[in-house]
Amino acid sequence: MTDHTRHAQTNGSEPPRESPVRHSREPRRDKHHNIRQTARRRFPRPAWLAYARFYEVYPQSFADTNGDGIGDLPGVLDRLDYIRELGCNALWLNPCFDSPFRDAGYDVRDYTRVAPRYGTNDDLVALFEAAHERGMHVLLDLVPGHTSEEHAWFRASAQPDPADRTVLPDGPHPESPDSPIDVSERYIWTDSWIAGGDGLPFIGGETERDGTYILNFFKCQPALNYGFAHPSQPWQKPALGPDALATCEAMLDVMRFWLSRGADGFRVDMADSLVKHDDEGKPFTIRTWQYLFSKIRPEFPEAAFVSEWGRPHESMEAGFDMDFYLDWRWGGHPNGYNLLLRNTDTPLLHEGDASYFNADSGASIAPFLEQYLPQLREAERADGLFDLITCNHDTLRTASRLSERERKVAYGMLLTMPGCPFLYYGDEIGMRYRPLPTKEGGYTRTGSRTPMQWDSGMANLGFSTAPAGQLYLPVDPDADAPTVADELARQDSLLNWVHTLLTLRTGRAALTADAGFAVVAAPEDGRTFAYLRTAATVAPVWPAQGIAAEAAIDAPADAPAVMLIAMNPGRETEYVELPDGIGTSPSIALALGGPAVEDGRLRLPPQSFAIVE
């Protein structure tokens, strides 16, 4: 996770890790931005992303098949049909590699071995194969910026004798298949046991090597060496210099290892923080990723890469296919995404919440769009995607604060906007954030990582057969804890609403990830939000800012080319004028709360949502 993502959950109670948060109401532009905003990708975006609808799986909390209390990969495979029938056709798996789990797997001990608690490498390959048989794709979570201090690379690099700082290759290397690899500079080491980190966090006295080493986050996560933008100390290596490129080659080997076994790409953790002391706009980190992609994309052209970056004008230039609109809130100041669902300093209380989707907030969608639209257009110009999430493993769930109706309206928007939607496991049934003691470095995030709730009639709500005290985290003990079985049985449930939205998105070219987007209504003194989505082969019709993608889309002959999505999260009825592009005989394809077309207008009662075609 990025710096700003990690402290987003603290509401400003923790200091920044390496550098201050660089966000403002508008994305910052560096001196190169006029060039960057029009730059297009060197490698085409994989075509399958236009139709992708992702489901994020936190593997230790999803489904346990061996009764040890921890979710595993066979459990994910067993639930693939549930995920597909829900309407998702792609997975993002949080880290499943071997780890001491001091940061829930984001401290990797071996990139090429599945953690035994999740299963085996064969289990992961079986998951790839089962997903592909169902027309699904799987992204793994790549952590390129640091490893665990228990990684073989780090243990070798920490040796006092430079001659001992070598490891054997993980796989065949045609140039020198049996030669040891020097990892002396694989991490960022200073040249003295009393040296500081030049403004970066560091650790000394932990190894026999005469030097201190730079950290990325926790004490257990030494930073891999991608160099410095402007080396100012003898121990600082240049970005894209020989040592930095050696680290790149090692990470390329990790990518090749899993892509050759069936992975469909990677979500990349802390993608914007490879090069240390980088300039505004991250030019050296961008060039590093360009180098990595120049090597890996020709070999695996259908592999997809989504960055944890949050600034698409940078991440798209770096070469990523997608970027997330990350949630952050620093010192009480929210970014655009935070304005939608989490604009509060008391995230468990409905009162005082100024989020757009809080029915009582009175908030307009306009401040969100002020930040979102420029970033969306930057992604579009680069033929990339800017993705919205319902939640993730670093973000507090909203169910404890927002009602089911409020979340239905919110998911109506999040699942019909441009980019690929990312649904966090359990959000579809309204799993709640639970204040819990920290687990594996989760701290305040731990309460969003509790076990999936499958069936109230089963032990541990169907997550595991282990004794309750052995579970990875406790399940929700409340009598009204939502479960998949109960939600499926209730016709008007949140799960069935999410399923309907995803199913509708599946069959409409106007709702693909790269379909055009144009705002129709976003009053500063009102609660409505309405927008047109336009199939990629059809020119936008309302207003001029609509952008059509270039790739042709196969769609049913009777599928509408343009769809109007409108919502009113507030307490009073509001109206939206129907734009000309919606057609002469508009009909409501999906409704919540009784919206109706009346005399060329769409009437939106309180807490309502509509899709008009």
Image: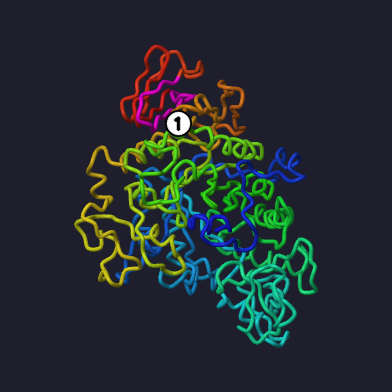
How many marks the image carries: the answer is 1
Residue annotated with mark 1:
508
From the top left corner, tell me how far across and down residue 585 is, in percent: 41, 14
The correct choice, above or below, for 167 with respect to 396 in the image is below
For label 1, the crowd category at 10 Å Cα-Cα, with few meaning under 14, some 14 to 19 and many 20 or more, is many
Image coordinates for residue 143, horizontal then vertical, percent: 57, 63
- Specify the farthest residue to the front: 352
The magenta stretch spans residue 491? no
- Disc 1 marks a residue whose amino acid type is Arg
Of residue 332 and residue 257, the one placed in the foreground of this image is 332
Q: Magenta segment, which residues? A: 556-576
Left-right relation of 156 to 126: right
Residue 129, x across and y down, in percent: 45, 56
Rendered position, 201 above or below 577: below
Taking the image as shown, residue 95 lies to the left or right of residue 496, namely right
Residue at position x 32%, y 48% from top? 429
Assign the N terminus to one quadrant of the image.
Answer: bottom right
Callout 1: SS: loop
Q: Is residue 562 magenta?
A: yes
